[in-house]
Each structure stands twice: as C-alpha cells, then as structure tokens.
Amino acid sequence: MELTLHNSGKTKASKVSVSDTVFAASYNEALVHQALTTYMAGARSGSKAQKTRSQVRGGGKKPFKQKGTGRARAGTSRSPLWRGGGVIFAAQPRSYRKKLNKKMYRGAMRSIFSELARQGRLTCIDDFKIDEPKTKVAKEMLSFLGMDNLLIITDDLTPNLYLSTRNIPMVDVIDTSEIDPYTLIGFNNVMITKPAIEKIESWLT
C-alpha cells in the first residue's frame, strides 16, 4: 500500500510504498484491547504497602492485666482493633503485570498501524531533523504540515529534536524503540519518518 509522503524541504507531498503486512492488516479489536490492557497494567506501580499487626513497632507488653479491669482482654496494643495498631488485611507491594506473547503483541501493533492508515491518520515524512534546539523552528515545520495533536516517530531522537518539541502542546516525538499501543492511539495523527518505517517493518514483518 502507499502512504502520503511529506517532504521536509516544503515541496509538494508524494506517495511512498510500505509493507501490506504491517500497514494493511485486518483489524483485530480483541487483540488490540488485550495488548492495551497488558501495557497499562504493566505501567502500574503496585507499591502500596500497609503494616500488619506483626509489622507495627511496639506492643510487646500486655497493656493491662487479664482480669478485674472490666475491659475486654487484650494481649497487645498493636491489635487491628486498637488505634495505632496494624491493618487486618494489609495491602502489600505487588506486580500487576500480565503476560502477552510476542507474536500477539506484534499482531496488535500491526492492527493499530493498519487501522491508522485506513482512517487516514498515518502519514510519512522523509526526515524530521532540527539543527539547533529551538521551539520556533519546530513550530514552523509543524505549521507547514498543517497537523495538530500529532505524534512523530523517528529512527533517531536527537537532543535538539527533543528540546525543540517538548514545549509544544499536543505534539510528541518518540524513537522507534519507544512505540507502544497506548501512545499510538492517543493522538489524532501519527507521522513516521522514512527510516523509521524501515525499522518498524523489520520489527513487525
């Protein structure tokens, strides 16, 4: 299939041929949902922690004698029934990670790229490089493309490119190694540099 190819030299857009396997695959909604939930689950910190009665400091001495006080018997002041005591079912650090086979993940990514292409939200640019870290230069390039809410995928994310685009609202630039399903579907438009397409095709073919 073919994608629209924008030229960074501000000349007329043309077409570029891409792999049908990666950019013209059928859409598998269930697989994309599974890949997305797996990615989001893996991003959870799972660092919540509470202390049980055995982990709370103190409480080694019996607070008062067993009989004759008129109070309920107690063996420790760190009981969950007492203020300052432990938690009955204490939350512990855990991992929310889910397992997803590599073939399934690659299949989901092919579905996402293909659906973006079918909806006309995926385009290509021959190159996207900035010689100096200036937001003004990046804005001029983006205004020529005429797109907002844009994700740009490049094969080499240089410091100049990162510094030039980080303050532009609703625009993000990532490397091919940072591609994930959540980021891909979070933008209205996705633009990929030509060298990045070759890397993506070698990864997903």
Image: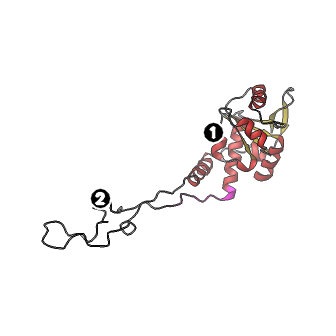
Q: Which residues are magenta?
A: 93-103
> Where, quadrant-wise, is the N terminus in this rendering?
top right
Disc 1 residue type (three-letter) = Gly
User: Height in image: 76 above or below 160?
Assistant: below
User: Height in image: 17 above or below 93?
Assistant: above
Residue 80's quadrant in the figure?
A: bottom left
User: Height in image: 136 above or below 178?
Assistant: above
Q: State the residue position of label 2.
A: 83
Residue 123's quadrant in the figure?
A: top right
Front residue of this view, candidates 21 and 135: 135
Element assignment for label 2: loop
Which residue lies at the image location 74% right of the left edge and 32% below the top edge? Answer: 135
Residue 109 is situated, as x and y percent measured from the top left of the image, at 69, 48
Residue 143 is situated, as x and y percent measured from the top left of the image, at 75, 26
Which residue lies at the image location 62% right of the left edge and 58% below the top edge? Answer: 100
Q: State the residue position of label 1.
A: 186
User: Height in image: 122 above or below 20?
Assistant: above
